[in-house]
Amino acid sequence: MHGIRMHGRTGSPVQQRSAAGRHGSKLKLVASAASSPSSSSDGSLYSFQPISSSTLTIPETSSRQNGHSSSPSTTTTTVILTEQQATMAKSAALYEVLEGVAKTGGSSIVTSTALPGLVPAGQVFVCPEESLFYSQAVEKLVLSRPDCPNTLVEFGAGDGSPIISALLKVPPVAGRAIHAYEISPASAQLAAANAAKVGLGDTYLVHNSCFWEGLRQTPCDCIISNPPYLPAPDDDIMMPGLWGGRDGAGLTRELLSAGFDTAMLLISAYSNPVLTLQHAREQGYAVEDFLCAPLPFGTYSSEPRVRQWITEMKGRGEAFYSQRGV
């Protein structure tokens, strides 16, 4: 993953669309470099499922030699969490719990029954490794900066854990408000509940409504988002909500065209990142800072129809990834 921070040029389209008196439009852009077709560098299979339980299952490889596996995952290690631990795992603590898994190249699936008061199983998508990076990017490239505005908007909230975790790691700021617009009722319900559980319900405001309609109610100069980025010919895929257009970057380019002074977005390396950066430059943005981290392909990007399309994009120079997961 690459976190790229950009700065707008004087007279750029972004500044021309900005309100009178604004100066120095910026883009903080995070590019997600998915670098492995279906597994990590040590051979462990990655599989991510919606999180809705109190059981953490970590698949492990059946044999290792000098830290490398000679076969796919065949055994699992299961950790039973208390209800309190599982509830926290659904909010800010989730990525702290799973950070060790991400560092060692393991997989993570949380299964079993839904916790009381939370949404039913199977309705909210969560990828711990990706969300951990998104949380770190929001924390370091946005919230920790002295020029961070008090009001931000988020396109898509998911389960809310990345933003909640980032907010818990920075000093509280009086009047800070992050308005998240999430079209999925299940995701919006879970994100709002998670924020309330850790006392951030008045700071992380989750709206179950259309992002573009919400902007009319909440004018803002700064956007943060991990937008849908799966590329495919159409949205007839396993998880249609993750479809980002034919090259995976359609929604991202739309957000970059919306005239925000500051944007911090995740961009996948297999979703036409070159064209996306060119589009950002045409909108008047320039790189200012970045973060990076590798990610493997997951369950939905490894769907045969999606994977074949990504392979074809790579042949056209529109997708970039390695076969070794590094």
Image (tube, rainbow, N blue to C red):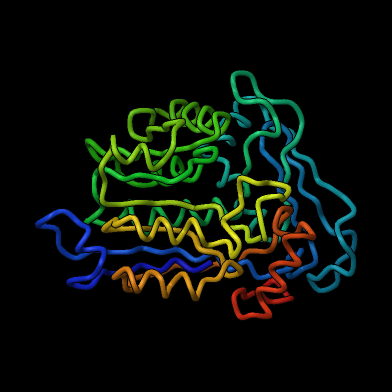
Looking at the picture, how far across and down is residue 60, in whole percent? 82, 55
**In the image, what residue occupies the spot 57% across and 41% down?**
94
The image shows a total of numbered marks equal to 0
- For the C terminus, the quadrant is bottom right
Image side of residue 99 versus residue 202, left or right = right
Residue situated furthest top in the rendering: 116
Name the residue nearer the viewer: 256 or 34.
Answer: 256
Image side of residue 231 versus residue 134, left or right = right
- 142 vs 7: above or below: above
Name the residue nearer the viewer: 172 or 17.
Answer: 17
- For the N terminus, the quadrant is bottom right
Quadrant housing residue 287? bottom left
Looking at the picture, how far across and down is residue 86, in whole percent? 63, 31
**In the image, what residue occupies the spot 81% across and 74% down?**
66
**In the image, what residue occupies the spot 67% across and 26% down?**
120
Name the residue nearer the viewer: 73 or 247.
Answer: 247
- 46 vs 40: above or below: above
Quadrant housing residue 280? bottom left
**In the image, what residue occupies the spot 68% across and 64% down?**
296
- 259 vs 51: above or below: below
Quadrant housing residue 278? bottom left
Looking at the picture, how far across and down is residue 194, in whole percent? 50, 30
Residue situated furthest left in the rendering: 21
- 119 vs 162: above or below: above
Looking at the picture, how far across and down is residue 301, in whole percent? 70, 58
